[in-house]
Amino acid sequence: MHVVTFGEIMLRLSPPGHLRFSQAHSFDVIYGGGESNVAVALANYGLESTFVTRLPNNDLGDCARNALRGRGVNTDQIVRGGDRLGIYFLEMGAVARGSKVVYDRAHSAIAEMGPGMVDWEYVFTHDAKGNKKKADWFHWTGITPAISQGAADACLEAIQMANKLGIMVSTDLNYRKNLWKYGKDPREVMPALVEGCDVILGNEEDAEKHFDIHPEGMDVTKGHDMAAGNYLPVMKALMDRFPRCKKAVVTLRGSISASHNSWAGTLYDGVKQYETKTYQITDIVDRVGGGDSFMSALIYGLLNFPDDDQRALDFAVAASCLKHTIFGDSNLVTVDEVEKLMEGDGSGRVSR
């Protein structure tokens, strides 16, 4: 099975451990980003994974590309050009102190991208070896159209081609208030893109900020009673607004503290609502990429268990639960490890 993702990969710089920016004398280097994290996880699960972006033709662009290649992702369709790689600085929070992110991604290579730079028909109809083979899935996130109008236009171009070819399209709405800086409100841009999606993932903030859809009385910053039933009106509203959507999905993160989250998920297929068990994730190693790890595992599950939405959802939640134990943006766990947790073994015993 072949999945194509489109978006930005960035250089992540983090003070070691839980140091504050003001304490740092060095930074740990990670390459990652919403869609590239999905690509890496899918390759790790054994799927053919192609990542499309635009990278500067310099050493940092090479490093980002090579980081993907080293994880088994096909990078042959990456466009080279532009002046710089986007950067973000991450200060890892703990207990009652939340993590902080500072972006430095203005004028990045993908921000200056536009339609016509990628031959999407070729991307979606050829495998990594150049053989004619239609892709099974295309994924993008709301981060990409938030970067620039050109990136949004390129994303729409890809969605329309995937629709034309009959390829499943998914999105993680991923609202980022600090990114929408080029003069457009997300309500002006996102609807046209989401109209082409078969699977929509988002939480109550995503739905509200993009489409004015939100559950009454829910607030991501207060409390941690994440009852799945509270989100059914949101999922129904998304499916009513976007008739192409076959599955609406919400991740249920209860933030007890920066170090302790509860984690679950719910899916609505237009008829039935599915929900998972709730995991208590304590002593979080790295929560960045948690949603990406959920989305990649959901894609894997929906492709491999096409008649069992409950199993696909359970796989996604278990996989993303494990991601919180992995340093860095991407989920590097195996299918066997996910299935072991799904079966109830969360002991963390040494595997000999």
Image: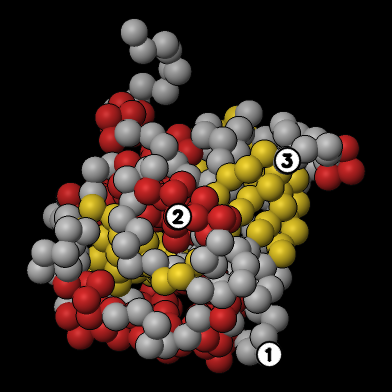
Counting from the top left corner in percent of width and height, residue 78 is at 39, 67
Question: The residue under label 2 is which amino acid type?
Answer: Arg
Is 146 in front, or is 188? Answer: 146
Q: Which mark is residue 127?
A: none
Question: Depth-wise, is mark 1 or mark 2 nearer the camera?
Answer: 2
Counting from the top left corner in percent of width and height, residue 132 is at 10, 68
Q: Mark 1 = which residue?
A: 183
Q: Quadrant of residue 351?
A: top left
From this view, report whether residue 317 is shown above or below residue 61.
above
Q: Mark 2 = which residue?
A: 65
Point out the tag, 3 or 1, that comes first from the N-terminus.
Answer: 3
From this view, report whether residue 341 is shown above or below residue 63.
above
Question: The residue under label 1 is which amino acid type?
Answer: Gly
Q: Is disc 1 placed on a helix, strand or loop?
A: loop
Q: Would residue 220 be seen by someone viewing this image from the given angle?
A: yes
Point out the tag, 3 or 2, that comes first from the N-terminus.
Answer: 3
Question: The residue under label 3 is which amino acid type?
Answer: Phe
